[in-house]
Amino acid sequence: MLTTIDELDEFKKKLQKGQIQRDTFKPARNKVVRLVEKAKKDNIVNEIENNKFDSKVLWKTLKKIFPTKATKSGKVKTFEKDGTMYTTPEEISNLFNEHFVAVANNIIESNNSTYPEFTKLENFVRLQKGINSYNLSIPTVTESEVLELVRSLPSHVATGLDGLSSHLLKIIASAIAPSLTKIFNCSLINGTVPSAN
């Protein structure tokens, strides 16, 4: 490739001196452009392949290919659901609340009859500690803890499977914190996590 670039430089000098026509220069230039594009593509493919298990490097590579532009406004101005456009902050907030409350209710309904089997874990803990009485529990979370965690999400990460960006979640944090707290606590109390469905 370096040889081809050197040839292009020679053609460029000859073109500037008037020793060759532009038609002779164009194919050499196009050849170099194609070679550079191919080298860039091969480099990106190699970077992705070599770093497919290193998410930090992988995202940096993907951002080179698909640069993101920061939005000037941090507020969600419109939201579309089922073909209906919602424009007021109250309508949008209510939609998010309804969504997260429905998620929490679905989890509660689907997990009422199923409790995890902790016998093996309890026996293991008892054997490791060498004691007959123990108390093994995970404390529930408070709404203020959830609010603090949502507000501390990094803004530069990609959206999750739900398609919601961390930036958007930060904006609506106070509106969704109560619902998220219910979901988290339900999960902790029942010992199960929601499925992706």
Image: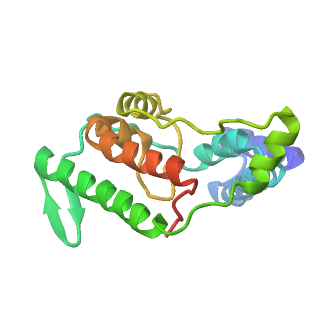
Vertical placement of residue 126 versus 118, above or below: above
The residue depicted at 48 percent of the width and 65 percent of the height is: 111
Q: What kind of colouring is applied to the model shown?
A: rainbow
The residue depicted at 23 percent of the width and 66 percent of the height is: 81
Across and down, in percent, residue 197 comes to 49, 70
Q: In the shown orientation, is residue 124 left or right of residue 24?
A: right
Q: Report the number of numbered marks.
A: 0
Q: In the shown orientation, is residue 94 left or right of residue 5?
A: left
Across and down, in percent, residue 158 comes to 52, 46
Asked which quadrant contains residue 150, the reply is: top left
In this view, the residue in front, 112 or 55, is: 112
Asked which quadrant contains residue 135, the reply is: top right
Across and down, in percent, residue 186 comes to 45, 51
Can the viewer see residue 51? no
In this view, the residue in front, 173 or 26, is: 173
Vertical placement of residue 152 versus 63, above or below: above
Across and down, in percent, residue 8 comes to 77, 47
In this view, the residue in front, 2 or 23, is: 2
In this view, the residue in front, 158 or 138, is: 138
Can the viewer see residue 186? yes
The residue depicted at 58 percent of the width and 44 percent of the height is: 63
